[in-house]
Amino acid sequence: MNNAADLSSASTHELSHGSSNETSPSAHFVHLRLHSEYSLVDSTIRLKPLMKAVAQAQMPSVAITDQMNFYALVKFYNAAIGAGIKPIFGVDVLLREDHDAEQQYHLILLCQTNTGYRNLTKLISAAYLRGQVLNVPLVTRAQVQQYSEGVIALSGGREGDVGKALLAGNSERAEALLSFWRDVFPNRYYLELQR
């Protein structure tokens, strides 16, 4: 698997609990990046109506990737399981440059295993305890690397470091960053494509 489309297809295939004869196009689609009402000031999506919509669309799974928190985790788990939906836990982290804390990027991290869940809780805690800049919790590439086991990474699209390098016309930097992330997340790093 070398791209985000492969991840969506693999996730749907592996997580699907329905018949292989599904006719709904949604049965082959999984939202892997979604903020809930627990991404304060960013989203108003409530968990129970979300689970109802996901179930009606016959989607087998959905990820919640709130900004720098797992506040919704227990409610999300209960609502998803109650609706027959496979929950995927994740977080939208803000990544900072070591030399310039004001230069920030998004990176979506998804729990692949229990170890990944524990690593993301440690990463989020580190951001709040030691990484705040102007009251915004941030992580560094070194911290993400330290807590990468059991985690799948999505590039952050145009707001990620690779995306911003591409938008700036700096393909050399984009390639270097892509190489770095593929080393940190072997076979677990995916480029996001956005409209």
Image (tube, rainbow, N blue to C red):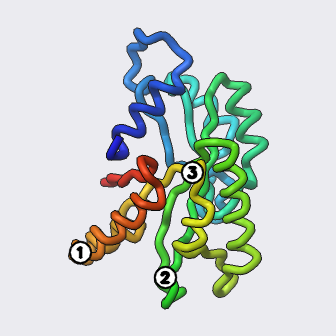
Report x, y in % for residue 183: 42, 60
At label 2, the amino acid type is: Glu
Q: As drawn, which residue projects farthest toward the bottom?
A: 99
Residue at image location 73% in from the left, 25% down from the top: 82
Residue occupied by mark 1: 172
At label 1, the amino acid type is: Glu
Label 3: element kind = strand
Label 2: element kind = loop
> Which disc number belongs to residue 151?
3
Q: Quadrant of residue 142?
A: bottom right
- N-term mark: 1 or 3: 3
Q: CA distance from mark 1 to mark 3?
A: 26 Å
Quarter occupied by the C terminus: bottom left
Report x, y in % for residue 118: 72, 53
Q: CA distance from mark 2 to mark 1?
A: 17 Å
Residue at image location 22% in from the left, 72% down from the top: 171
Label 1: element kind = helix
Q: Is residue 68 above or below residue 70?
A: below
Residue occupied by mark 2: 97
